[in-house]
Amino acid sequence: MNRHGHDLDRAAATLASAAHLVVFTGSGVSKESGLATFRDVDGAWAQYDPMDYASPQGFRRNPQGVWEWYAQRRQQMLEVEPNPAHLAIAALENLIAEVTVITQNIDGLHQRAGSSRVLELHGNIHRYKCSRHCRGEPTYLPTPDPFEETLQPCPYCGAHARPDVVWFGESLPPDVWEAAAFAAMTCDAMLVVGTSGAVEPAASLPRYARQHRAFIVEVNPETTPITQIAGAALRGPAGEWMPALLEAVRDIHDAQA
Ligand code: APR
Protein backbone atom coordinates (compact mmCIF):
# COMPACT_ATOMS: atom_id res chain seq x y z
CA MET A 1 0.00 0.00 0.00
CA ASN A 2 1.53 3.32 -0.91
CA ARG A 3 1.74 6.22 1.55
CA HIS A 4 -1.50 7.58 0.21
CA GLY A 5 -3.05 4.17 0.95
CA HIS A 6 -1.99 4.44 4.60
CA ASP A 7 -3.24 8.04 4.71
CA LEU A 8 -6.54 7.04 3.12
CA ASP A 9 -7.01 4.27 5.69
CA ARG A 10 -6.18 6.63 8.55
CA ALA A 11 -8.49 9.33 7.22
CA ALA A 12 -11.35 6.88 6.67
CA ALA A 13 -10.98 5.33 10.13
CA THR A 14 -11.04 8.80 11.69
CA LEU A 15 -14.13 9.92 9.78
CA ALA A 16 -15.94 6.62 10.42
CA SER A 17 -15.60 7.14 14.17
CA ALA A 18 -16.27 10.90 14.17
CA ALA A 19 -19.44 12.29 15.78
CA HIS A 20 -18.91 15.79 14.33
CA LEU A 21 -16.94 16.37 11.13
CA VAL A 22 -16.09 19.82 9.80
CA VAL A 23 -15.26 20.07 6.10
CA PHE A 24 -13.32 23.29 5.49
CA THR A 25 -13.09 24.13 1.80
CA GLY A 26 -11.48 26.60 -0.56
CA SER A 27 -11.64 27.22 -4.30
CA GLY A 28 -9.75 23.98 -5.07
CA VAL A 29 -12.89 21.97 -4.28
CA SER A 30 -14.64 23.74 -7.19
CA LYS A 31 -11.70 23.44 -9.63
CA GLU A 32 -13.08 20.24 -11.17
CA SER A 33 -16.40 21.96 -11.73
CA GLY A 34 -14.46 24.22 -14.08
CA LEU A 35 -14.05 27.26 -11.81
CA ALA A 36 -10.70 28.98 -11.41
CA THR A 37 -8.90 29.06 -8.09
CA PHE A 38 -7.20 32.28 -6.99
CA ARG A 39 -3.49 31.55 -6.46
CA ASP A 40 -2.82 28.70 -8.87
CA VAL A 41 -0.82 29.72 -11.92
CA ASP A 42 -4.09 29.90 -13.88
CA GLY A 43 -5.97 31.44 -10.95
CA ALA A 44 -8.08 34.61 -10.86
CA TRP A 45 -5.36 36.68 -9.17
CA ALA A 46 -2.98 35.88 -12.02
CA GLN A 47 -5.30 37.88 -14.31
CA TYR A 48 -6.98 40.39 -11.99
CA ASP A 49 -5.55 42.51 -9.19
CA PRO A 50 -7.58 41.60 -6.07
CA MET A 51 -7.26 45.21 -4.87
CA ASP A 52 -9.07 46.32 -8.03
CA TYR A 53 -11.79 43.65 -8.03
CA ALA A 54 -12.16 42.40 -4.46
CA SER A 55 -11.80 45.46 -2.24
CA PRO A 56 -14.08 48.37 -1.22
CA GLN A 57 -11.52 50.80 -2.67
CA GLY A 58 -11.57 49.02 -6.01
CA PHE A 59 -15.36 49.12 -6.07
CA ARG A 60 -15.39 52.85 -5.26
CA ARG A 61 -12.86 53.50 -8.04
CA ASN A 62 -14.58 51.39 -10.69
CA PRO A 63 -18.04 50.16 -9.63
CA GLN A 64 -19.11 49.29 -13.18
CA GLY A 65 -15.96 47.22 -13.82
CA VAL A 66 -16.31 45.32 -10.54
CA TRP A 67 -20.02 44.75 -11.20
CA GLU A 68 -19.22 43.27 -14.64
CA TRP A 69 -16.52 40.98 -13.19
CA TYR A 70 -18.93 39.55 -10.63
CA ALA A 71 -21.76 39.27 -13.19
CA GLN A 72 -19.46 37.27 -15.48
CA ARG A 73 -18.36 34.98 -12.59
CA ARG A 74 -21.98 34.57 -11.45
CA GLN A 75 -23.02 33.47 -14.94
CA GLN A 76 -20.19 30.93 -14.97
CA MET A 77 -21.06 29.62 -11.49
CA LEU A 78 -24.66 29.11 -12.57
CA GLU A 79 -23.55 27.25 -15.71
CA VAL A 80 -21.26 24.73 -13.94
CA GLU A 81 -22.32 21.76 -11.81
CA PRO A 82 -21.17 20.44 -8.44
CA ASN A 83 -18.35 17.95 -9.05
CA PRO A 84 -17.74 14.53 -7.39
CA ALA A 85 -15.93 16.24 -4.51
CA HIS A 86 -18.97 18.37 -3.60
CA LEU A 87 -21.25 15.33 -4.00
CA ALA A 88 -19.04 13.11 -1.81
CA ILE A 89 -18.90 15.80 0.88
CA ALA A 90 -22.70 15.99 0.87
CA ALA A 91 -22.98 12.17 0.98
CA LEU A 92 -20.83 12.04 4.14
CA GLU A 93 -23.93 13.34 5.95
CA ASN A 94 -25.43 9.84 5.52
CA LEU A 95 -22.49 8.28 7.41
CA ILE A 96 -21.52 10.84 10.07
CA ALA A 97 -23.94 12.15 12.69
CA GLU A 98 -23.04 15.84 12.29
CA VAL A 99 -21.29 17.41 9.29
CA THR A 100 -20.61 21.15 9.07
CA VAL A 101 -19.24 22.57 5.83
CA ILE A 102 -17.29 25.79 6.33
CA THR A 103 -16.47 27.24 2.94
CA GLN A 104 -14.47 30.22 1.72
CA ASN A 105 -16.18 29.82 -1.64
CA ILE A 106 -19.01 32.09 -2.83
CA ASP A 107 -20.27 29.80 -5.63
CA GLY A 108 -23.08 28.01 -3.76
CA LEU A 109 -21.99 24.60 -5.13
CA HIS A 110 -21.97 22.84 -1.74
CA GLN A 111 -25.66 23.68 -1.28
CA ARG A 112 -26.45 22.58 -4.85
CA ALA A 113 -24.65 19.28 -4.12
CA GLY A 114 -26.95 18.68 -1.14
CA SER A 115 -24.87 19.70 1.87
CA SER A 116 -27.39 20.78 4.48
CA ARG A 117 -25.24 22.88 6.84
CA VAL A 118 -22.97 25.31 4.99
CA LEU A 119 -21.28 28.27 6.65
CA GLU A 120 -20.19 30.77 3.97
CA LEU A 121 -17.32 32.73 5.49
CA HIS A 122 -16.89 34.99 2.46
CA GLY A 123 -20.55 35.40 1.47
CA ASN A 124 -22.35 34.27 -1.63
CA ILE A 125 -22.13 35.70 -5.15
CA HIS A 126 -25.83 35.01 -5.72
CA ARG A 127 -26.84 37.48 -2.96
CA TYR A 128 -26.74 41.26 -3.43
CA LYS A 129 -26.88 44.11 -0.89
CA CYS A 130 -26.89 47.90 -0.69
CA SER A 131 -23.30 49.22 -0.63
CA ARG A 132 -24.46 51.81 1.91
CA HIS A 133 -26.39 49.34 4.14
CA CYS A 134 -29.18 51.93 4.05
CA ARG A 135 -31.63 49.75 6.02
CA GLY A 136 -29.14 48.13 8.36
CA GLU A 137 -26.20 45.78 7.77
CA PRO A 138 -26.72 43.96 5.52
CA THR A 139 -29.55 45.45 3.46
CA TYR A 140 -30.25 42.59 1.08
CA LEU A 141 -31.53 43.44 -2.39
CA PRO A 142 -33.30 41.38 -5.04
CA THR A 143 -30.72 39.39 -7.05
CA PRO A 144 -30.38 40.96 -10.49
CA ASP A 145 -30.42 38.89 -13.67
CA PRO A 146 -26.97 37.23 -13.95
CA PHE A 147 -26.76 38.68 -17.46
CA GLU A 148 -27.38 42.21 -16.14
CA GLU A 149 -24.06 43.83 -16.95
CA THR A 150 -25.03 47.35 -15.88
CA LEU A 151 -24.37 48.43 -12.32
CA GLN A 152 -27.69 48.52 -10.46
CA PRO A 153 -28.84 51.06 -7.84
CA CYS A 154 -30.26 50.17 -4.44
CA PRO A 155 -34.05 50.56 -4.89
CA TYR A 156 -34.30 52.12 -1.42
CA CYS A 157 -31.58 54.78 -1.47
CA GLY A 158 -30.06 54.84 -4.95
CA ALA A 159 -26.55 53.87 -3.80
CA HIS A 160 -24.74 51.18 -5.80
CA ALA A 161 -25.86 47.59 -5.27
CA ARG A 162 -22.98 45.10 -4.74
CA PRO A 163 -22.50 41.35 -4.32
CA ASP A 164 -22.84 40.09 -0.74
CA VAL A 165 -19.24 38.84 -0.62
CA VAL A 166 -16.39 39.69 1.78
CA TRP A 167 -13.73 41.86 0.15
CA PHE A 168 -10.16 42.32 1.32
CA GLY A 169 -10.13 44.65 4.33
CA GLU A 170 -13.73 43.80 5.27
CA SER A 171 -14.84 41.76 8.27
CA LEU A 172 -16.42 38.35 7.95
CA PRO A 173 -20.11 38.15 8.88
CA PRO A 174 -19.85 37.98 12.73
CA ASP A 175 -22.55 35.34 13.20
CA VAL A 176 -21.04 33.08 10.52
CA TRP A 177 -17.51 33.47 11.89
CA GLU A 178 -18.67 32.69 15.43
CA ALA A 179 -20.47 29.53 14.29
CA ALA A 180 -17.45 28.47 12.21
CA ALA A 181 -14.95 29.00 15.05
CA PHE A 182 -17.22 27.09 17.45
CA ALA A 183 -17.58 24.20 14.98
CA ALA A 184 -13.79 24.10 14.46
CA MET A 185 -13.16 24.00 18.22
CA THR A 186 -15.73 21.29 18.94
CA CYS A 187 -15.37 18.88 16.01
CA ASP A 188 -13.64 15.48 16.20
CA ALA A 189 -12.16 15.73 12.72
CA MET A 190 -11.63 18.41 10.07
CA LEU A 191 -11.30 17.65 6.39
CA VAL A 192 -9.43 20.55 4.72
CA VAL A 193 -10.17 20.47 1.00
CA GLY A 194 -8.73 22.72 -1.69
CA THR A 195 -7.41 25.70 0.19
CA SER A 196 -3.95 27.29 0.20
CA GLY A 197 -4.50 28.43 3.80
CA ALA A 198 -3.31 31.88 2.69
CA VAL A 199 -6.11 34.12 3.96
CA GLU A 200 -6.93 34.94 7.58
CA PRO A 201 -8.96 34.59 9.67
CA ALA A 202 -10.30 31.57 7.73
CA ALA A 203 -6.88 29.93 7.64
CA SER A 204 -6.83 29.81 11.47
CA LEU A 205 -9.73 27.37 11.62
CA PRO A 206 -7.63 24.21 11.08
CA ARG A 207 -5.28 25.38 13.85
CA TYR A 208 -8.25 25.94 16.19
CA ALA A 209 -9.43 22.41 15.42
CA ARG A 210 -5.94 20.93 16.00
CA GLN A 211 -5.54 22.84 19.26
CA HIS A 212 -8.78 21.19 20.39
CA ARG A 213 -7.40 17.74 19.46
CA ALA A 214 -9.33 17.26 16.20
CA PHE A 215 -7.70 15.03 13.58
CA ILE A 216 -6.89 17.02 10.44
CA VAL A 217 -7.02 15.50 6.94
CA GLU A 218 -5.79 17.60 4.02
CA VAL A 219 -7.01 16.99 0.45
CA ASN A 220 -4.89 19.00 -1.98
CA PRO A 221 -2.48 18.26 -4.85
CA GLU A 222 0.01 20.61 -3.15
CA THR A 223 1.38 20.98 0.36
CA THR A 224 0.25 24.07 2.29
CA PRO A 225 0.90 25.58 5.76
CA ILE A 226 -1.91 23.30 6.95
CA THR A 227 0.06 20.17 5.93
CA GLN A 228 2.22 20.34 9.06
CA ILE A 229 -0.77 19.88 11.38
CA ALA A 230 -2.49 17.23 9.21
CA GLY A 231 -2.53 13.64 10.47
CA ALA A 232 -3.26 12.41 6.94
CA ALA A 233 -2.80 13.96 3.51
CA LEU A 234 -4.54 12.87 0.30
CA ARG A 235 -2.22 14.42 -2.27
CA GLY A 236 -4.25 14.96 -5.43
CA PRO A 237 -7.48 16.36 -6.87
CA ALA A 238 -10.49 16.50 -4.56
CA GLY A 239 -12.70 15.14 -7.34
CA GLU A 240 -10.74 11.87 -7.17
CA TRP A 241 -9.86 11.61 -3.48
CA MET A 242 -13.22 12.59 -2.00
CA PRO A 243 -15.19 9.74 -3.69
CA ALA A 244 -12.43 7.30 -2.63
CA LEU A 245 -12.61 8.57 0.96
CA LEU A 246 -16.42 8.35 0.98
CA GLU A 247 -16.24 4.74 -0.25
CA ALA A 248 -13.62 3.83 2.35
CA VAL A 249 -15.78 5.28 5.16
CA ARG A 250 -18.82 3.47 3.77
CA ASP A 251 -16.86 0.17 3.72
CA ILE A 252 -15.99 0.61 7.41
CA HIS A 253 -19.61 1.34 8.25
CA ASP A 254 -20.81 -1.70 6.29
CA ALA A 255 -18.24 -3.93 8.03
CA GLN A 256 -19.47 -2.69 11.42
CA ALA A 257 -23.15 -3.19 10.56
N1 APR B 1 -8.54 19.59 -5.70
C1 APR B 1 -8.15 20.05 -4.49
N2 APR B 1 -7.38 21.15 -4.31
C2 APR B 1 -7.00 21.80 -5.43
C3 APR B 1 -7.36 21.39 -6.74
C4 APR B 1 -8.17 20.22 -6.85
N3 APR B 1 -8.56 19.75 -8.04
N4 APR B 1 -6.80 22.26 -7.63
C5 APR B 1 -6.13 23.18 -6.91
N5 APR B 1 -6.24 22.91 -5.59
C6 APR B 1 -5.67 23.62 -4.44
C7 APR B 1 -4.41 24.40 -4.74
O1 APR B 1 -3.27 23.57 -4.60
C8 APR B 1 -4.47 25.48 -3.64
O2 APR B 1 -3.85 25.02 -2.45
O3 APR B 1 -6.63 24.59 -4.07
C9 APR B 1 -5.97 25.66 -3.39
C10 APR B 1 -6.52 26.98 -3.91
O4 APR B 1 -5.90 28.01 -3.17
P1 APR B 1 -6.33 29.52 -3.48
O5 APR B 1 -6.34 29.74 -4.94
O6 APR B 1 -5.50 30.38 -2.59
O7 APR B 1 -7.87 29.59 -3.02
P2 APR B 1 -8.43 29.67 -1.54
O8 APR B 1 -7.56 28.91 -0.59
O9 APR B 1 -9.85 29.29 -1.62
O10 APR B 1 -8.30 31.24 -1.21
C11 APR B 1 -8.87 31.69 -0.01
O11 APR B 1 -8.56 33.96 -0.76
O12 APR B 1 -8.65 35.52 -2.45
C12 APR B 1 -9.31 35.02 -1.34
O13 APR B 1 -11.63 35.23 -1.06
C13 APR B 1 -10.66 34.48 -1.73
O14 APR B 1 -11.87 32.75 -0.58
C14 APR B 1 -10.63 33.05 -1.21
C15 APR B 1 -9.49 33.04 -0.22
Image (cartoon, rainbow, N blue to C red):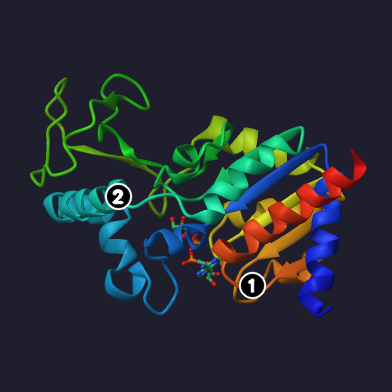
| In this picture, residue 210 sits left or right of residue 206 | right
Specify the amino acid type for callout 1.
Answer: Thr
On whether ligand 1 comes within 8 Å of the CB at mark 1, the answer is yes
Specify the amino acid type for callout 2.
Answer: Pro
Residue closer to the observer: 221 or 257: 257
Which of the two labelled residues, at mark 2 and mark 1, occupies the earlier sequence position?
A: 2
Give the CA distance from mark 2 to mark 1.
28 Å
Q: Residue at left 32%, top 54%?
A: 55
> Can you tell which quarter of the image residue 118 is in?
top right
Q: Which mark is residue 224?
A: 1
- Looking at the rendered image, the disc whose residue lies closer to the viewer, 2 or 1, is 1
Q: Residue at left 80%, top 80%?
A: 2
Question: Considering the image in quadrants, where does the N terminus appear?
Answer: bottom right
Query: What percent of the width, then of the height, locates residue 201?
Result: 58, 52
Query: What percent of the width, then of the height, locates residue 17?
Result: 87, 44
Residue annotated with mark 2: 56
Category of crowding for the residue at label 2, using alpha-carbon neighbours closer than 10 angstroms: few (below 14), some (14–19), many (at least 20): some
| In this picture, residue 36 sits left or right of residue 11 | left
